[in-house]
Amino acid sequence: MATDSPANKYLDSKTLDKIKRLEVRARLVVEGFISGQHRSPFNGFAIEFAAHREYSPGDDLRHIDWKVWSKTDRLYIKEYEEETNLKCHLIVDCSKSMRYGEETGWSKFDYAATAAASLGYLMQQQQDSVGLVLYSDKIDKNLKSSSHPSHLKLLLHELEQTEPANTTDVSDPFIALGSQIRKRGVIALFSDLFIDPEELAKALAQFRLRRHEVVVFHVMHHDELEFPFQDNTLFQGMESAGELHAEPRSLRKSYMEAVERYMTRVKKVCATAGVDHVLLDTSKPLDGVLSSYLNFRSKSRRKNL
């Protein structure tokens, strides 16, 4: 993506950090993203499978359901209808570890909240329904999905008022959500995944069993990805009482290896569950969130064709 467009500056986290109102941030991110596209990002995302009918001469051969033909020896066409009010649930981690980075600029939660708000704003342009769930070791807030413009303002207000706290736990909260979010839709999870990957696997299974489409936006601070520390540093646990005073350069190699192993496990868990995994580096522009979501929807649609 080009970086010299005037709108692109609004995709940069350092610029957005100066804009305090989340609603304004979200609008600027989406408008900046759309201005960089050569065509509307909304084209081709609003149809879903409706029913089968028998093939008639002149029908588009691309829509023949060959799986049905292999079982019945008869040709059927898959018909589609426009989606009305796709439901998307934005699930945002507000545990204490998401506060990392707030002393020097944007925290992981700031980045996640702006990313979620931008996605909500983008979906509102499509008249889709958007809901919001905030969780830590419990469900802190659950706002049902709606496509009404005032509802998005309510979601953004909740994100703005949230102060990350408590530990991370997906077991009980996601079991509860699995039974509450019944109608098939899109689940967009924003989290630093400060949990055991096996617990993540169980949590994702709650949504996949109900045939939700799921994309995991894995939010990590640039420090966590690169470990840039040079001088003697006191490392303190975000969700535990532990601390370590150490010379960082002696730890960097083993730390980076541990992060790589962890990322490999997380990606494997997501792939096994049929879930998209998108790594978000808090130092990177936010257009990656929107383009990743649209690519995700495009792949999901092609699987249903």
Image: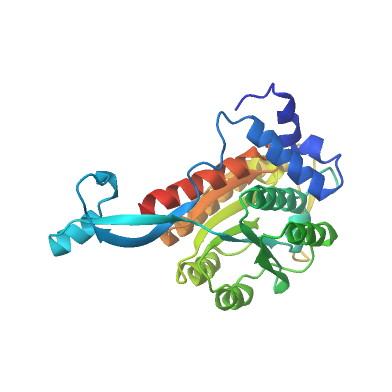
Q: Position of residue 181 (x, y in %)?
A: 58, 72
Q: Is residue 237 visible?
A: no
Q: Is residue 25 left or right of residue 299?
A: right
Q: Position of residue 75 (x, y in %)?
A: 18, 56
Between 114 and 40, the one lying in front of the other is 40
Quadrant position of residue 173? bottom right
Between 152 and 103, the one lying in front of the other is 152
Q: Is residue 126 visible?
A: yes
Q: Is residue 220 above or below residue 175?
A: above
Q: Is residue 188 above or below residue 206?
A: above
Q: Is residue 209 above or below residue 228?
A: below
Quadrant position of residue 222? top right
Identify the residue at the far top of this view: 4
Residue sitting at x 71%, y 36%: 11
Identify the residue at the far left of this view: 73
Q: Is residue 225 above or below residue 127?
A: above
Between 98 and 206, the one lying in front of the other is 206
Residue sitting at x 62%, y 44%: 289
Residue sitting at x 67%, y 53%: 120
Identify the residue at the far front of this view: 57
